[in-house]
Image: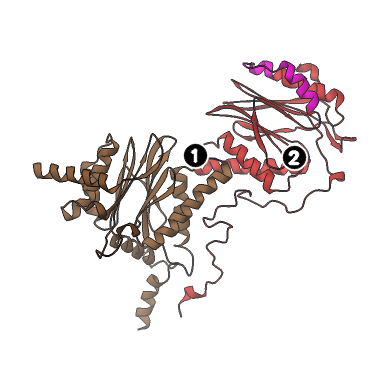
Chain colours: A red, B brown
């Protein structure tokens, strides 16, 4: 009786797809939690996040408030923009837990992609993947902005909770979006420099912080260029507008 | 008797190393590749040429039913040598993996990434109890970021990249011929001619256009195209003419 007949547990297609790769809607590592979130007790970022493309790179600005349903300020010093790729950053909008897990998942995907292929993930691929995860997972209450730079230039995408991915020259998400858009519609123009875009983005968040109860307490500004991602927090808007 | 059966165990179990560190079943799978009719791949700046000899044993058989060159995606073709049925499993895996890349990242899969997915799968069948290795080698040719690429997979799950390569029967003869004749500045027609000459080399007589399966993936359009039989006939006629001149 030969040994190998007894190895019964083997199944070549146990990983979901025939080629062993994960489902396109699921991360390579870990799994998406199967339960959703109970809205009332979840920290949400309320939030205003802004992304603007320029020829030299992308500017992202976010406010610093976490709240419970926009009625109670649960944290006054939240960094809502995180680097997820050597030349890309993502904003946290909506459920804090969902957004943080989303960011960790995307970071590991970006690192695996780079390690396996010896090239950085293109921003469009990252946007597609983020859209798939938003669609396939229980990250219902997130609505982040992805901003990044690659060989094709500067990109800003908004990613909605149903997995919609839309590219734009500038975009805003979060509860203060109408206020921020009102300012950007006046101030955005083609050919804006990176420095002017930083000022416009900070002013947009400031407008929202003044009137939206879910937004406030200062601004984080990120500049994404071909050289990398630079993120700085400012308690006072006076420093940056 | 006991001693003999002990010895045979090394080549019966795929997951068992011999005392000198060999996996006999993988080596036997390479023998299966050598028994298959030859395939060649040629990389030129203008694109990749894949050509396969399909042996048709009976005049009653439809030659087109012997498939040795497969389209994996618009920009990638795969030629095989060895067990055709094993090749089809791997080709289907490659097709699914190529579409998976579109679903996951919204982008076209790279030739090397696709080949790695196939070799990862092949490797799994050299280390898992109850399995047998794939008795097939593949040539994966395509265009990636505007660059033509040509890779080979072998039954151990190793991949190699080539300028020009032969797999299957008479590999040594054909590879020697390619080493002698290959030039890095060939155009696509030159690549086609070299591929057909290489397949003709072992018999020292041009192959029949109906007995070969040929495809190209052009660098400019990044598209897999089968080469029609009348075109093969005219290239073969040219080769024949050149040889008579010598």
Q: Which mark is residue B170?
A: none
Q: Secondary structure at mark 1?
A: loop
Q: Which quadrant holds residue B133?
A: bottom left
Task: Please tell me whether residue B139 is drawn above or below residue A208 in the rendered image.
Answer: below
Residue A202 placement, left or right of B200: right
Camera-nearest residue between A32 and B54:
B54
The span picked out in magenta is A178-197
Label 2: element kind: loop
Q: Foreground mark, 2 or 1?
A: 2
Instruction: Identify the main secondary structure in magenta.
Output: helix
Residue carrying label 2 = A142
Tell me the residue that label 1 is attached to: A118
Q: Chain of mark 1?
A: A
Q: Residue at x 32, y 60 (%)?
A: B33
* Figure disc tally: 2
Question: In the image, residue B91 lies at what x, y percent?
Answer: 43, 54
Q: Is B234 colored magenta in this rendering?
A: no
């Amino acid at each position: 009786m030969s040994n190998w007949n007894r190895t019964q547990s083997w199944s070549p297609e146990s990983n979901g797809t025939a080629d062993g790769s994960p489902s396109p809607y699921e991360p390579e590592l870990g799994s998406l939690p199967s339960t959703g979130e109970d809205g009332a007790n979840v920290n949400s970022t309320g939030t205003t996040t802004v992304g603007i493309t320029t020829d030299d790179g992308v500017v992202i600005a976010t406010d610093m408030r976490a709240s419970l349903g926009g009625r109670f300020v649960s944290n006054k010093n939240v960094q809502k923009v995180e680097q997820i790729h050597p030349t890309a950053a993502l904003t946290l909008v909506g459920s804090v837990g969902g957004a943080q897990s989303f960011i960790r998942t995307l970071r590991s995907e970006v690192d695996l992609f780079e390690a396996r292929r010896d090239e950085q993930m293109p921003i469009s691929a990252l946007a597609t993947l983020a859209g798939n995860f938003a669609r396939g997972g229980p990250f219902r209450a997130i609505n982040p902005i992805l901003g990044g730079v690659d060989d094709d230039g500067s990109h800003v995408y908004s990613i909605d909770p149903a997995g919609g991915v839309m590219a734009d020259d500038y975009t805003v998400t979060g509860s203060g979006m109408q206020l921020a858009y009102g300012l950007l519609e006046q101030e955005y123009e083609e050919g804006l420099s990176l420095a002017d875009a930083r000022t416009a983005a900070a002013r947009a968040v400031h407008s929202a912080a003044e009137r939206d109860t879910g937004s406030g307490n200062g601004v984080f500004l990120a500049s994404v260029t071909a050289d990398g991602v630079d993120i700085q927090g400012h308690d006072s808007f006076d420093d940056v507008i | 008797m006991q001693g003999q059966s002990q010895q045979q165990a090394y080549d019966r179990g795929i997951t068992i190393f011999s005392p000198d560190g060999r996996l006999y079943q993988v080596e036997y799978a390479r023998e299966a590749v050598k028994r298959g009719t030859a395939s060649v791949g040629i990389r030129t700046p203008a694109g990749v040429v894949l050509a396969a000899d399909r042996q048709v044993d009976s005049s009653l058989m439809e030659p087109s039913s012997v498939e040795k060159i497969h389209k994996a995606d618009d920009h990638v073709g795969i030629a095989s040598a060895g067990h055709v049925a094993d090749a089809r499993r791997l080709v289907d895996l490659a097709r699914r993996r190529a579409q998976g890349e579109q679903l996951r990242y919204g982008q076209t899969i790279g030739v090397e990434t696709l080949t790695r997915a196939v070799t990862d799968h092949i490797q799994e069948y050299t280390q898992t109890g109850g399995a047998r290795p794939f008795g097939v080698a593949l040539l994966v040719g395509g265009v990636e970021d505007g660059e033509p690429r040509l890779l080979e997979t072998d039954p151990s799950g190793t991949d190699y990249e080539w300028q020009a390569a032969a797999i299957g029967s008479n590999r040594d003869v054909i590879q020697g011929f390619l080493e002698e004749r290959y030039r890095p500045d060939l155009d696509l027609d030159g690549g086609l001619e070299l591929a057909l000459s290489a397949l003709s080399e072992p018999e020292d007589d041009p192959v029949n256009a109906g007995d070969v399966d040929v495809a190209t993936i052009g660098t400019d359009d990044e598209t897999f195209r089968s080469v029609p039989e009348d075109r093969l006939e005219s290239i073969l006629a040219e080769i024949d003419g050149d040889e008579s001149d010598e």
